[in-house]
Amino acid sequence: MNIKTQIVIHILLLFLSIKSLNAQIVNDSLNYSELRNNELTEDGSISVITKHYKFDPKKDSVFIFNQGKLVLSKQTNVLFNKFNEHKFTSYNTQKNELELFDASTIQTLVISNVTKPIIIPKHSLIFFLDSSTNSYRLTKVSRNKVKEIWSEKKSNISFINISDDQQILLIQRNDIEQGIELINLLNLKKTVNRDIIHPIKQVKWSKKHPVVFLLPTPFGNNQYPYLTFYNYHTNQNFRQNLNQDSFFNDIETTSDSSFKIIENTFSKKKPYNKDEVELWSTTDRYLRNALSNSNTNEYSINRHIVFNYKNKRVYQPQELDNHESVSLNENTLLVYDSNQYLDYTHSWSSRPRDISLYDIKNHNLTIITKKQESPFNTTSLSPRGNYFVYIKNNKLFFYNINNKSLENTFELHEDNQKLRVFVQRLRTWSSDERYFYFVSNSNLMRYDTKNKTFKIVIDSNNITSRYELINPLTTSIFNDNSELHYRAILNDNKLIILKLNINENTRSLIVVDNGKQSETIVKNTKDLISNVKYSKDLKSFTFTLENFNKPKTVFIYKNGRTRQLFKNSMPEEYYTWKQQKIVTYKDKYGNNLKGILFYPKDFNRNNKYPMITHIYEIQNSIANKFLYPTYLNRSGFNTDIYLEKGYFVFYPDILTTQQEGPGLSALNCLEISLKTILKEEKAIDKDKLGLIGYSFGGYATNFIITQLHIFKAAVSGFGSSDIVNSYFSYNENFTSPNYFLFENGQFNLGSFKENKELFLLNSPILFADQIKTPLLGFAGKEDRNVEWKLQQEFFIALLRFRKPHISLFYKNEAHGFSKKENQVDITKRTMDWFDYFLKNKDTEQTNWIKSNIFFEENRIIN
């Protein structure tokens, strides 16, 4: 074969592979769609629903209803958002057109030549750059007219910005000697300050004071030689010179005439040549930055500086070096040091630290709580900064910041159910700080800060329950800080609660008014409730219901009754065939678990079908989710594709206990669940069982097949094989030594020092010689969560023990597939694997397995 012919063949093969890829994506089905309940007006009269086509968004449509009647149906993938009253905006980026649709008059107003629009609904304003005149324009919409409020050629403007709360428009012109101009977007009054004549490159708006920081460096550059503190209510400004060799962050006002800032200074040179070596030290406070800062020459120190223009003082408290802080008021900071304790047994944000109050003027530290672990999950700062709540030893502590005293406590009773829904504790304040809502003993509780009393708001009647708050939340007035928890609702007296009954797997949508359950919108449905929208008076609701065998349908609740508003027109033959069985079982320690079995399409009880078991942790929340078949899967697995190919798919719950560790717990739970499901469903072919897992499920798969030999094929993706190796490794995704995952995380094994035997008993690679199940393993070579070399080591172990095995290493993938071509590839290869071993499919499509999985006997030396 000549070179020219070879080139032609390669091009043809490439074309066919691309065509095959596109075909796989397209053939997922262009008719699969999902309804989304997008908007409901404050008076509850107008609702907006979009229909999204999963694999062909060009077919997307929008549907607008007035009083339950369809007034607009339009094919578009442009979103419709609430503007004011009954108007909605939609922006077409291709046409540079902004449409305003009035659902009450069914009229559309089009604004042309719109680029970079900023919609300001609460003031009926639209700010944009007019592409035809290259001018900035601020316009006000009233009825069906657009009135221009302000405009200026872009060529005349050097800087322009709208405040985070959309209250102020700030303008600086090229002629900076003119100063700056501000437009109050509430009353449209203008203010000019001619003292500010330095170029502005970026701004930072205060969240709780009428202050903006004007900065001379562009976004992303925090090396400020100076900044301007500008109070736009008083029109006063103060230029503050800073150390031009330092970097600054966490700018935060402490009052309308003071602020604090964190200065990062470099203290000393590294004692080695950074171009040749990295030095890792066990005493390093910032081990998490050992890699990211390996190319810098010096160590840095973070220092607090507080500038107070009212009393003309500058405070530089050295005791707060390397601390993080939140400004509560002019004289008080809430402070902590994430690296206070040399404890890497928790992830970075979960490490224990003392949380204290700092008195700026008197330089006093008052400790609130010592060694507080996982602050995001165990603390709550009230919306005005007057209370700090924390959880320790199953007790709630209410600390009054103003009095610097513990105000109250409450003994918490929390269940040990590990669900993948409502994963965060419910800890929410009313915006006036009068009430604090939380959950104990499956009851929704309320603490009254005025009367210092506790009250049961929703009594679960001893049924294990979870709660999710649907109310709109207030915006935090504090600096964003993920290590402390903050949550407050806008409506102080009324709550919208989604309640989950864990035992029955039912959901209810409930309205609570002034501490009492007043109305039940949906009661004990087996369906999944989502996309909840509501009117201002909480008398009208729209929401979607779905289940495994029915796609999302939009319902409306009004005047005390519920009716269907809009149903998905997707062909019913796509989903009405779906069947499911839920089985319950207990692990060896008596914990209640569930398994979800999905039935193959065209199921015939007289036939036998192979079954794929998908393993992870607690999975039963999948029971009432509507799933779509697709080859675009991050983990290489899709339930519906297997159902359509004639497989059962089984999702058992796995609960890791410290008595046994993750591998043995998974083995125990899986054996019990399989025994249960095989007894209850005789159509499962027990001689044709497959096992698959991803991430933690990949680890569990690796371990289970070393101990259990009933599976004819297994697939493991992105999973660990050597947990001793994993324990003593550095996890770049979590910027932390990996042992926190084993001591206080997913693997639940405790310390290696105290549990060496248990670690060894749960490590798959030590039992690789016992594997009898053909295993397909895969990993991404850019994975920073589970190091891909662990899959390589498992491959080498199986090679050494002559165990048939194929590993796939994807060069440019991390912990999950992101590239479409790789998503399709791994999904197809996984299907090929199970088809080959469970259905005896020996075709050209599975030839890659046959040619790589068997040893030639005559080459084996015994």
Image (cartoon, rainbow, N blue to C red):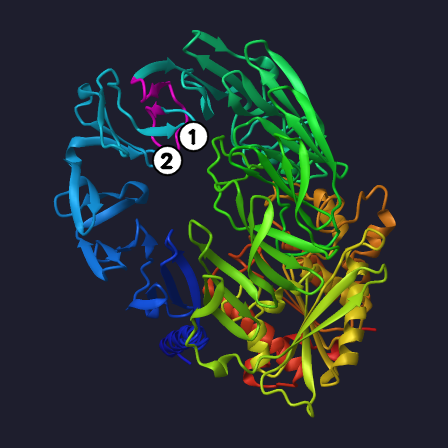
Q: Residues within 10 Å of mark 2 (few under 14, many from 20)?
A: few
- Tell me the SS state at disc 2: loop
| Residue 323 visible in image | no
Figure check: 665 above or below 113: below
- The local secondary structure at tag 1 comes to loop
Picture coordinates of residue 271, whole percent (x, y): 60, 22
10 Å crowding of disc 1: few (<14), some (14-19), many (20+) = some
Q: In the image, 152: left or right of 58?
A: left
- Residue located at (79% from left, 49% from top): 749
Residue 93 visible in the shown view: yes
Q: Which residues are magenta?
A: 212-235
Task: Residue type at mark 1: give it.
Answer: Lys
* Quarter of the rendering containing residue 372: top right
Which disc is residue 572 wearing?
none
The kind of residue on which mark 2 rests is Asp
At 34% across and 20% down in the image, what residue appears?
A: 231
Q: Nearer the viewer, residue 787 or 390?
A: 390
The residue at the point 61 percent across, 43 percent down is 734
Residue 207 circle label: 1
Among the 4 quarters of the image, the one containing residue 179 = top left
Q: Does 140 appear above or below 843?
A: above
Q: Looking at the image, tell me whether mark 1 or mark 2 is earlier in sequence order.
A: 2
Which residue position is annotated with label 2?
A: 164
The verdict on residue 808 being magenta is: no
Q: Is residue 127 left or right of residue 437?
A: left
Question: Which residue reaches farthest top?
Answer: 312
Q: Are marks 1 and 2 in contact (CB under 8 Å)?
A: yes
Q: CA distance from mark 1 to mark 2?
A: 8 Å
Q: How many numbered circles does the render carry?
A: 2
Instruction: Give yes or no for residue 222 being in the magenta stretch.
Output: yes
